Image: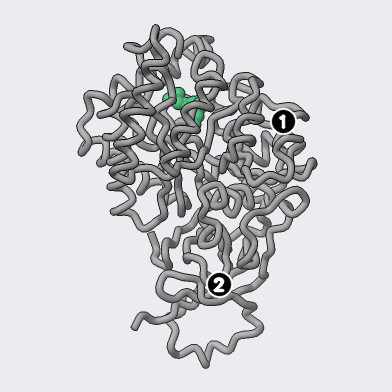
Amino acid sequence: MERVQLFIHIRFLWGVHPANLLRVEGEQMSDLPMIENAWLKVLNGKILGVGRMSDINLAEETDSTIIDLQGKSILPAWCDSHTHLVFAATREEEFLQKIEGKSYEEIAASGGGILNSALKLQSTPEDVLYEQAAARLSALVATGTGAIEIKSGYGLSVEGELKMLRVIKRLKQSFQIPIRTTFLGAHAYPTVFKNDHPAYIRLIIEEMLPNIAAEGLADYIDVFCEQGFFSLEETKQIVEAGQKFGLKPKLHVNQLSNNGGVQLGVAMNALSLDHLEEIGQAEIEVLKGKATMATLLPGCSFFLGIPFAPAKTMIENGLGIALASDFNPGSSPSGNMHFILKLACIKMKLLPEQAVNALTLNGAYAMELSADFGSITKGKAANFIVTKPIDHLVSLAYHFGDNLIDSVYICGKKW
Ligand code: NIG
Ligand code: FE
């Protein structure tokens, strides 16, 4: 029988939410329950209990393996609900073009961007893609990611999309962290369909979706709903087709323009609406009181130099928000969620408690995982981050150039 692991002398144990809380919204986003000078017990990969050091008699804990954290602190592992982790190559050449003044849209319109990634992915064998993605994921877990969503969307052909989704399936089989898969065939129109958009949509609906469903390769469906990419009408058509196969929508909306994506996504019961850099009060009103999670991606704003989503105003209006990395080679070439926390506090002016809730519990909600992940709660997976010794939660953002993560535990095992 496995022995209980007892972590002791935890300076701050953050994120001790009640078990029935699946997400936080509005004022509740500032509430990150914490136990000072705490202990944490883990058994069989799950959290067995938490408490104060003053309430435990270590002499009686003879059945436990004791791990003395000596004043380090614990946070729930990050739950990254939006990534494009599987890709064939980085895009430094486009970064140089950006430095020289070209915009994301200009680069995309000249055959770069998503189409550039799709071209490279076409000629990359599945095994190579898998090895690259596994190495990336392994490195991300070391930075504290304990649950993740991964999208397809660089295949843009039946074989290409299936190849990506099979890679994600293999990652699911070989990693202990939960992975949710999103089918994003509608990421861009491939060059061969440049002048026949309806034909590409037919390919998605009639070829890709049935094959994906037959192999059980996706949990969700996504569309890049944006001027120059997929219109509202096209988005609706693709989402409806995905829903017939049981795939819930998680959509890219309002990234570059305010074009009604939020209204459409909420009307279609999206699990999450992601980006939201270009929203106003009307979109905030539409999101109020809905099951849809507003997911913000400050890494993309930072890297592309586009506006940050109005996170603070959203929370003041009673919304819950999740924060995710959007890890991809074009608009956010980092999956480091600790950096996202720094951006949220520095650029979006979120309180560290709000940012941590957005990066953990609400991120888990945006993957339908928050009953089992995203907080330090009895019965949930023992996926957590041990920080270096810090005196305040805000230190994690204040020391913006430092890595304050000491170690990461997944199902109670040190990564
Ligand atoms: O979330 N906006 C669309 N998709 C990605 C970027 C993909 C790429 O440029 O390769 C995003 O920003
Ligand atoms: Fe994205």
The residue wearing badge 2 is 378
SS for dot 1: helix
The residue wearing badge 1 is 283
Do tag 2 and tag 1 residues touch (Cβ < 8 Å)? no
Q: Residues within 10 Å of mark 2 (few under 14, many from 20)?
A: many
Q: Residue 119: where, in percent of width, then height? A: 30, 19
Q: Quadrant of residue 261?
A: top right
Front position among marks 2 and 1: 1
Q: First in sequence, mark 2 or 1: give its number.
A: 1
Q: Which circle marks residue 128 in the picture?
A: none
Image point (28%, 47%), residue name? 170
85, 157: nearer the viewer:
157
Image point (22%, 24%), residue name? 123
Q: Residues within 10 Å of mark 1 (few under 14, many from 20)?
A: some
> Disc 2 residue type?
Lys
Residue 386, relative to residue 287: is it above or below?
A: below
Residue 35 visible, this orientation: yes
286, 12: nearer the viewer:
286
Between the residue at mark 2 and the residue at mark 1, the CA separation in whole angstroms equals 36 Å
> Disc 1 residue type?
Glu
Residue 25, relative to residue 75: is it above or below?
A: above
Quarter of the image containing the N terminus? bottom left
